[in-house]
């Protein structure tokens, strides 16, 4: 399975037993998997279906599943909220008594907010189980569509990441070639400086010894070897059949650590320039890795 991204959208709709609904599943980047659910009251099994479905498909990202459901008109029982009706009557009674308002009509009273209520508690267990099962299937379909969208994002990211890893490898080899000239440059610079200070008293032996010591401190071969190893590891992760976002993120930190050390040891402007290009490429790689599951 190719790498997967963490952003996407999925939608599914359905009907059952006089109900209709729409399910939307969407996700954005996240360090861990976080599942949020919004659904109609009284259908408590839907949240569990959403959470278990997301956990079975994803390992990272903020996943939000929303269910909007409504019962068709004329389906199910209704009831009159007598308490609310009495409040309306009590409030209007003084106006009717003073002649400032006509006596209320029944149809007008029933149209007032909160007087007529749908009795959703009338679902029997069998009907509720069937409804939750049908909506649960739509939740699964929406999550499958979300999964496909995230994989599509991963497919688009893969060549970008691979190209950036190739560029890191290219710059690392370029740095190796430039760094090969550091010992001679260090020796020449130290010799010129020492002769400026000590004149002809500066011995060739001392120049060689001091330049060698400085050359050891400026040796970047270990950093370049580790960079090459990290490049191989990154290529392996990009080809892996797993969620590799966290490991790529850690590898990016290792890339940057070696690039920083390379720049700090550099004694040549050309090597510093390559190191800065390397750091810029690694930062671009890091930004893209944040999108990988």
Image (tube, rainbow, N blue to C red):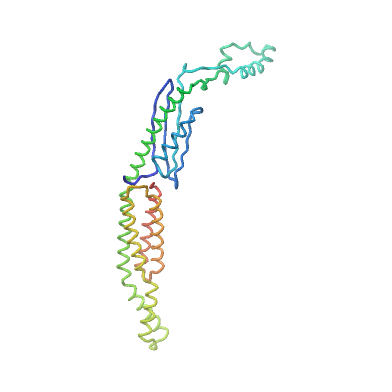
Q: Is residue 283 above or below residue 225?
A: above
Q: Position of residue 230 (x, y in %)?
A: 35, 59
Q: Nearer the viewer, residue 53 or 261?
A: 53
**In the image: residue 93, left or right of residue 186:** right
**x and y percent of residue 185 in the render?**
34, 75
Q: Quadrant of the N terminus?
A: top left
Instruction: Determine whether 243 is above or below 119 in the image.
Output: below
Towards the viewer: 271 or 60: 60
- Marks counted in the figure total 0
Q: Residue 61's spot in the image, x, y percent?
A: 43, 44
Q: Position of residue 274 (x, y in %)?
A: 34, 64
Asked where in the image residue 212 lies, by quadrant, the reply is bottom left
Point out the residue furthest to the front here: 126
Residue lying farthest bottom? 201
Picture quadrant of residue 90 = top right
The image quadrant that residue 228 belongs to is: bottom left
């Amino acid at each position: 399975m190719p790498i997967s991204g963490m952003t996407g959208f999925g939608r599914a709709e359905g009907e059952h037993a006089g109900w209709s609904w729409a399910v939307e599943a969407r996700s954005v980047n996240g360090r861990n998997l976080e599942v949020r659910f919004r659904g109609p009251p009284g259908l408590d099994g839907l949240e569990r279906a959403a959470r278990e479905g997301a956990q079975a498909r994803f390992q990272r990202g903020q996943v939000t599943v929303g269910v909007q459901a409504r019962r068709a008109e004329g389906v199910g029982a209704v009831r009159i909220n007598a308490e609310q009706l009495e409040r309306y009557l009590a409030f209007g009674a003084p106006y009717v008594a003073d002649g400032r308002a006509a006596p209320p009509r029944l149809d007008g009273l029933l149209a007032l907010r909160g007087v007529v209520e749908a009795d959703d508690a009338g679902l029997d267990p069998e009907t509720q189980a069937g409804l939750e099962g049908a909506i649960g299937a739509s939740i699964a379909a929406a999550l499958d569509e979300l999964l496909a969208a995230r994989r599509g994002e991963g497919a688009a990211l893969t060549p970008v990441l691979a190209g950036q890893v190739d560029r890191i490898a290219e710059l690392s080899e370029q740095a190796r070639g430039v760094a090969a000239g550091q010992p001679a440059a260090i020796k020449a610079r130290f010799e010129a400086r020492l002769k400026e200070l000590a004149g002809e008293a500066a011995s060739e032996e001392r120049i060689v010894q001091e330049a060698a010591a400085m050359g050891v401190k400026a040796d970047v071969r270990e950093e370049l070897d580790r960079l090459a190893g990290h490049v191989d590891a990154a290529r392996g992760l990009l080809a892996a059949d797993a969620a590799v976002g966290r490991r790529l993120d850690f590898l990016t930190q290792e890339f940057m650590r070696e690039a920083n050390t390379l720049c700090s040891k550099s004694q040549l402007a050309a090597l510093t320039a390559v190191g800065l290009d390397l750091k810029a490429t690694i930062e671009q790689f890091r930004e893209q890795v944040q999108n990988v599951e």
